[in-house]
Amino acid sequence: MQLLPSTAEWLAEKNGESDYHDDKLFEPAYNIETGSRYLAELLKQFNGSEVVALAAYNGGRGRVRNWLDEGIWDGSEAHLEQIPFSETRAFVQRALKNYRNYQRLYGDNPTNTGGSAGSGPCYPGQG
């Protein structure tokens, strides 16, 4: 997951992690765990709004809070064009598209690893 070192350091301090250093972000397990914790934190901060949390993940918590408070963006998926940063707008659109594709393929069961929802796992070499 893509994380700024300053964000990872903030999360490490928040979680009482005393051995944080930027090189840990290159460790896949640590990076995924930290990125997931950050996304969970953003979901809490933005009252469960996946769209706003995704925008904050990419564009920054403070900026997104500012956009919402100043009425620049209403926080809805219907008005993504209001997001002032094209990179953040594109990130949110891609993430939502990928999420919907995941749901279409696997349903709401994250342990289902292939096929259509409820069809069970699909292993290499199987149709």
Image (cartoon, grey):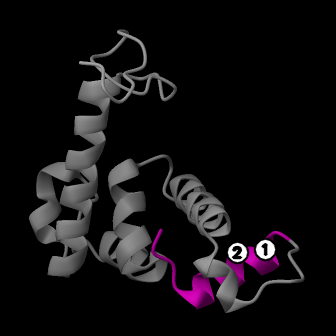
**Is 26 left or right of 46, judged from the image as shown?**
right
**Amino acid type, label 1:** Lys
Which stretch appears magenta? 1-15
- Which x, y percent locates residue 24? 69, 81
Q: Nearer the viewer, residue 15 or 113?
A: 113
- Which x, y percent locates residue 98? 25, 47
> What residue is rendered at 39% in x and 25% in y?
123
- The residues tagged by marks 2 and 1 sit, at their Cα atoms, a distance apart of 5 Å
Residue 3 located within the stretch drawn in magenta: yes
> What residue is rendered at 87% in x and 83% in y?
19
Q: Nearer the viewer, residue 66 or 120?
A: 120
**Is 53 left or right of 33, judged from the image as shown?**
left
Residue bearing mark 1: 14
Magenta stretch, main secondary structure class: helix
- Which x, y percent locates residue 100? 24, 37
Residue 21 located within the stretch drawn in magenta: no
Q: Which mark is residue 11?
A: 2
Q: Determine whether 93 is above or below 11 in the image.
A: above
Label 2: element kind: helix
Q: Determine whether 58 is above or below 36 in the image.
A: below
Tag count in the figure?
2
Quarter of the image where one finds residue 57:
bottom left
Quarter of the image where one finds residue 58:
bottom left
**Amino acid type, label 2:** Leu
Q: Nearer the viewer, residue 82 or 11?
A: 11
* Disc 2 and disc 1 in contact, CB within 8 angstroms: yes
